[in-house]
Image (cartoon, grey):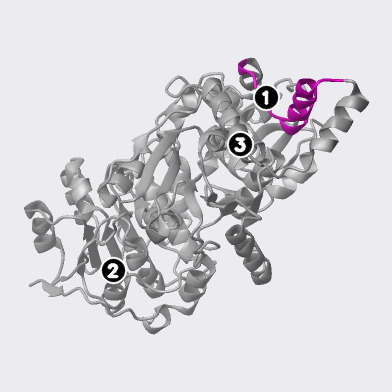
């Protein structure tokens, strides 16, 4: 019989929930301060060994609600599969696997593997054979594995069905039955679902033992005064998109959100180079410096702060009119927290969001959870940018022209005499100095703007959506199977000729590690701060990969990438010597 736990406002600190010390240390490291309602109620039940049904929307913190107690209860020294999390989509499976890795960061013997379609089975099988304790899988791909190894799930102690209603909508009922039958009856089962239709209740009655139910009402709402918009871009187009949008947005102060510390520095540097008063705010910033940045934003010495979510906690500056989500947040709750930084004190605010092709689903989730449609906008063209520049210049000069107390009449007469020019010629010269570095003609603005690849006509769109682009089918492009060493996977194939100005670098990650060209490309673009054009050919081999990078500044770039991980493993790029 299902027991239902009523919603309660009481919040217990994480350290009172009986979690493992290593898990608590990881929670502190990622910046969690107090549990959400779903976590407060679910963690004690899972820690006590109860089967459970959790009814909660995406964005309420449910991943941590099951990951934290399960990691606290597994035997980290046993090298066998103990935890199975089923997710309806590849994107969610990767997201959950990443969360488990973060929470298990202080547990070096715990390994996590994500199993999903569209990726080679070899690395997945190897990770399972090597004793990964946590398997996060989509049902279809897991059934494929079971057809090869029927005993794969024989040691599972904990089963989680995440977004169970979505799994049934996608037609996984038969696959779920196969998976249930492949597991021991003596296990703990936790089911999370936004809704509980009869089909979900049927699964609970058949496969859960006296489950307790936790229901969390979604309280996530956006501020009505905030105007929200999104722009579709590729990951390597973000900085250029930010620069274009800032040209036309009429903002007083702005906070831009990114996911990594390095991104705060890279984007702040790019904006500063264009003359913006900007600073970075991340977890490495000392408290006294953080306070100076916030004070500068309050009094107008700074107009833009680029921050990570953790670093921006507690930031309350009434003059912030815009929030720019340069990187998509990990969940809708974070999105709401971010945009809540604007629209304060009865003022209107504006929230902008950059969305890459692979993040379309998360955009839909955000819209569903917030109950608001986020309108799509297009990049401003040269004509719009020129009009915005002229408008800003007019606004800057208007009060000066109207100033009747201007004391520069004598200076004007002196300069026109000394330079033997008219007041009009002098005004033109001063305008040239004032507008130095910015074009004020249509042709000039067009020359300034980088060309951005159109959406839907680039192979990266298909790769970002998880499909197989031409290269993954064995074409001649970046990282295709044609680059893996010829017939039989021979590793000694000679590298292709280098592009001009590039050097070849090597990483020990290859096909056997589940790495594709787009994985390496995305990691280098995100952490290295390069444009797409700066990276040359990427060749994926069986046991290693080669990447062409700019020779200029190579050592600095490799230093930036030294802690980067791809497919859960260290990238460790180094210069490749042909001999």
Task: Tell which of 102 and 31 is nearer to you.
Answer: 31
Q: From this viewpoint, which residue is outermost toward the right?
A: 418
Residue 411 pos. (x, y %): 84, 36
- Quickly name the residue at label 1: 439
Q: Considering only order in the chain, which callout, 2 or 1, is on the residue closer to the N terminus?
A: 2
Residue at x-position 47% and y-position 70%:
27
Crowdedness near tag 2: few (<14), some (14–19) or many (≥20) residues, C-alpha within 10 Å: many
Residue at 25% of width from left, 48% of height from top? 371
Instruction: Inspect the magenta stretch and tell me whether residue 548 lies in it.
Output: no
Segment colored magenta = 421-442
**Labelled pair 3, 2 in contact (Cβ < 8 Å):** no
Image depth: mark 3 or mark 2 in front: 3
Name the residue beneath numbered marker 2.
38
Q: Is residue 556 left or right of residue 528?
A: right
Q: In this picture, is 498 found above or below 332?
A: above
Compute the Cα span from label 1 to label 2.
54 Å
Badge 1 density bin: few <14, some 14–19, many ≥20, Cα 10 Å: some
Q: Kindly identify which residue carries mark 3.
A: 398
Q: Is residue 464 visible?
A: yes
């Amino acid at each position: 019989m299902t027991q239902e736990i009523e919603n309660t406002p009481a919040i217990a600190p994480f350290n009172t929930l009986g979690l493992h010390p290593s898990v608590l240390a990881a929670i502190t490291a990622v910046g969690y301060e107090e549990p959400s309602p779903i976590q407060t109620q679910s963690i004690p039940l899972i820690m006590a060994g109860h089967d459970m049904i959790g009814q909660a929307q995406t964005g309420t913190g449910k991943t941590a609600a099951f990951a934290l107690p399960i990691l606290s209860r597994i035997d980290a020294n046993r090298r066998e599969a103990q935890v199975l999390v089923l997710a309806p989509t590849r994107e969610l499976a990767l997201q959950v696997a990443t969360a488990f890795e973060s929470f298990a960061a202080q547990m070096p013997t715990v390994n996590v593997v994500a199993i999903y379609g569209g990726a080679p089975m070899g690395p997945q099988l190897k990770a399972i054979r090597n004793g990964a304790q946590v398997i996060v899988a989509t049902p279809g791909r897991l059934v494929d594995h079971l057809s090869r190894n029927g005993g794969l799930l024989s040691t599972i102690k904990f089963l989680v069905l995440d977004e169970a209603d979505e799994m049934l909508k996608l037609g996984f009922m038969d696959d779920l039955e196969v998976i249930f039958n492949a597991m021991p009856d003596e296990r703990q089962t936790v089911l999370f679902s936004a809704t509980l239709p009869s089909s979900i209740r049927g699964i609970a009655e058949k496969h859960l033992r006296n489950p307790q139910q936790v229901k969390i009402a979604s309280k996530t709402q956006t501020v009505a005064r905030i105007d929200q918009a999104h722009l579709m871009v590729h990951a390597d187009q973000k900085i250029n998109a930010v620069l274009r949008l800032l040209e036309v947005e009429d903002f007083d102060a702005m906070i831009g959100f990114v996911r990594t510390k390095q991104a705060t520095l890279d984007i702040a540097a790019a904006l500063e180079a264009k003359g913006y008063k900007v600073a970075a705010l991340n977890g490495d910033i000392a408290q006294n410096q953080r306070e100076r940045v916030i004070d500068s934003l309050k009094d107008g010495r700074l107009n833009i702060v680029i921050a990570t979510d953790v670093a921006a906690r507690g930031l309350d500056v009434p003059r912030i009119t815009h929030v720019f989500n340069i990187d998509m947040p990990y969940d809708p709750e974070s999105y709401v927290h971010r945009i809540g930084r604007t629209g304060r004190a009865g003022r209107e605010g504006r929230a902008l969001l950059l969305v890459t092709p692979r993040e379309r689903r998360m955009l839909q989730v955000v819209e569903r959870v917030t109950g608001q449609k986020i309108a799509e906008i297009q990049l401003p063209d040269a004509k719009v940018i020129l009009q915005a520049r002229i408008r800003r210049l007019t606004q800057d000069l208007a009060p000066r022209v109207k100033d009747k107390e201007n004391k520069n009449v004598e200076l004007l007469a002196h300069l026109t005499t000394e330079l033997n020019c008219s007041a009009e010629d002098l005004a033109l010269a001063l305008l040239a100095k004032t507008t130095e570095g910015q074009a004020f003609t249509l042709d000039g603005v067009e020359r300034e703007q980088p060309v951005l690849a159109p959406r839907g006509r680039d192979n990266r769109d298909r790769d970002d959506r998880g499909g197989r682009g031409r290269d993954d089918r064995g074409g001649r492009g970046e990282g295709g199977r044609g680059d893996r060493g010829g017939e039989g996977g021979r590793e000694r194939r000679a590298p292709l000729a280098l592009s001009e100005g590039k050097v070849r670098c090597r990483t020990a990650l290859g096909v056997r590690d589940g790495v594709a060209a787009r994985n390496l490309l995305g990691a280098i673009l995100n952490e290295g701060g390069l444009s797409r054009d700066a990276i040359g050919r990427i060749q994926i081999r069986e046991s290693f990969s080669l990447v062409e990078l700019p020779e200029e500044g190579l050592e600095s770039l490799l230093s930036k990438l030294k802690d980067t991980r791809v497919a859960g493993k260290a990238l460790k790029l180094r210069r490749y010597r042909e001999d």
